[in-house]
Every structure is written in C-alpha cells, then in structure tokens.
C-alpha cells in the first residue's frame, strides 16, 4: 500500500514561527516595561491570531493512499474515498493554485502551499485516471509546469524583519 503524506512547506513555517516568537517578545517587553494598555491588547490579539495560524499550518497535511485522500487540519480529519470523488478541478489565481476535489457530499480544496504540490497532484490523477472522472487540464498542467508561490514566504520574512526592527527600537528607547 503506497502512501504519500504532504505538509505545508517548512520554508513558510519557519518565518511564520519567527514572527510568532517576535510578537511574543514584543508582548513580554510591553508587559514588563509598562507599555500602553492599547499596545498590550493589540499585541495580545496579534500573538493569539498568529499562534493559531501557525498551529493550523503546522498541523495541516494531505495523505494519499490506495483507498483515497485524507485531509488533516488542526481539529478535523476528512477522508475522501476515490469512489466518492466526482470531479477534479484547478483554480489558478496569480501564483496561487488550488486543486478542487468535488465529492458527492461537497468539495475540498488543496492549495499549492503544500510541499511537492506537483507530486501530490500527480498522485491524485494517477489514482483517478482509470475511473470515469472529469479531470481538468489545469491539474495536469500543474504536474508538468508547477506554479511556485513565494509571496507568502516573502511576506512572512518581511514581517519578521519589521518585527525585529520594532524589537530593536523598543530596546533602544529604554
């Protein structure tokens, strides 16, 4: 039984984790040095939101097996049997690509934020190609010419640099 497991790219999780740590450091500095009440509230909200995004991204995975596709998120798991999938579509918005798996009960979305996205798309097509399921040409195109999305990665690193500058200014002002 062959099985492939795909997770969100580490190249995105690392700067996101750094962002969370820097936000947490800013919150600690604000609490320790009597920062403004508004500053503490805003930083607390940002820490909670960014930590929840990090936990969600770190726990997401897609597993492909001989039985079907398993989509895991932070608190839920969906198992899609190959026989339940009726259509495989592709949506491309600039550098973001989404594979849409339509089933008898609804649809599920897989983005190109996953590591080895073209291999993942290839495994899905390989399992469904023999069956009479409509597979859009865009999905096959992602296997041959995968679209790389680095905008999220760049944004996470820019946020880390900005947060680092803010931390430096906090230390310099004391």
Image (cartoon, grey):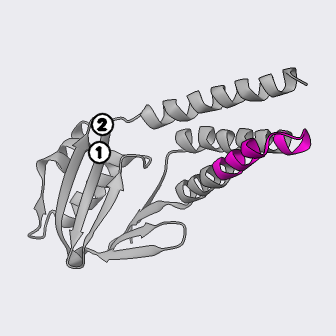
104 sits left or right of 66 in the view: left
What's the residue at 46%, 74% (across, down)?
77
What's the residue at 48%, 74% (across, down)?
76
Along the line of sight, the residue nearer the viewer: 121 or 157: 157
| Element assignment for label 2 | loop
Magenta-colored stretch includes residue 51: no
Q: Residues within 10 Å of mark 1 (few under 14, many from 20)?
A: many
Q: Is residue 67 visible?
A: no
Is 119 placed above or below 167 here?
below
Question: Residue 12: x, y in percent?
Answer: 53, 41
What's the residue at 55%, 35% (across, down)?
156
- Residue at the extreme front: 37
Magenta-colored stretch includes residue 39: yes
- Separation of disc 2 and disc 1 at Cα? 7 Å
| Disc on the earlier residue, 2 or 1 | 1
**Residue bearing mark 2:** 147
Query: What predominant SS class does the magenta segment belong to?
Result: helix
Along the line of sight, the residue nearer the viewer: 34 or 147: 34
Question: Residue 152: x, y in percent?
Answer: 46, 37
Question: Residue 63: x, y in percent?
Answer: 42, 65
Q: Which quadrant of the structure image shows residue 86?
A: bottom left
Q: Is residue 137 visible?
A: yes
Q: Which mark is residue 155?
A: none
Q: Which mark is residue 97?
A: 1
State if disc 1 and disc 2 touch (CB < 8 Å): yes
Instruction: Name the quadrant of the N terminus.
Output: bottom left
Along the line of sight, the residue nearer the viewer: 39 or 145: 39
Is 83 placed above or below 2 here?
below
Q: Which residues are magenta?
A: 30-46
Name the front one of labels 2 and 1.
Answer: 1
């Amino acid at each position: 039984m062959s099985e492939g497991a795909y997770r969100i790219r580490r190249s995105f999780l690392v700067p996101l984790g750094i962002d969370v740590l820097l936000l947490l450091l800013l919150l600690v500095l604000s609490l320790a040095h009597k920062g403004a009440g508004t500053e503490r509230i805003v930083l607390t909200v940002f820490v909670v939101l960014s930590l929840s995004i990090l936990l969600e991204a770190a726990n997401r995975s897609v597993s492909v097996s001989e039985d079907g596709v398993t989509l895991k998120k932070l608190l839920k798991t969906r198992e899609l049997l190959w026989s339940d999938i009726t259509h495989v579509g592709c949506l491309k918005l600039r550098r973001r690509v989404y594979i849409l798996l339509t089933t008898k009960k609804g649809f599920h979305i897989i983005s190109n934020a996953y590591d080895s996205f073209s291999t993942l798309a290839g495994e899905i097509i390989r399992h469904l190609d023999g069956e009479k399921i409509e597979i859009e040409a865009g999905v096959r195109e992602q296997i041959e010419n995968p679209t790389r999305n680095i905008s999220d990665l760049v944004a996470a690193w820019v946020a880390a640099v900005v947060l680092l500058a803010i931390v430096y200014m906090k230390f310099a002002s004391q």
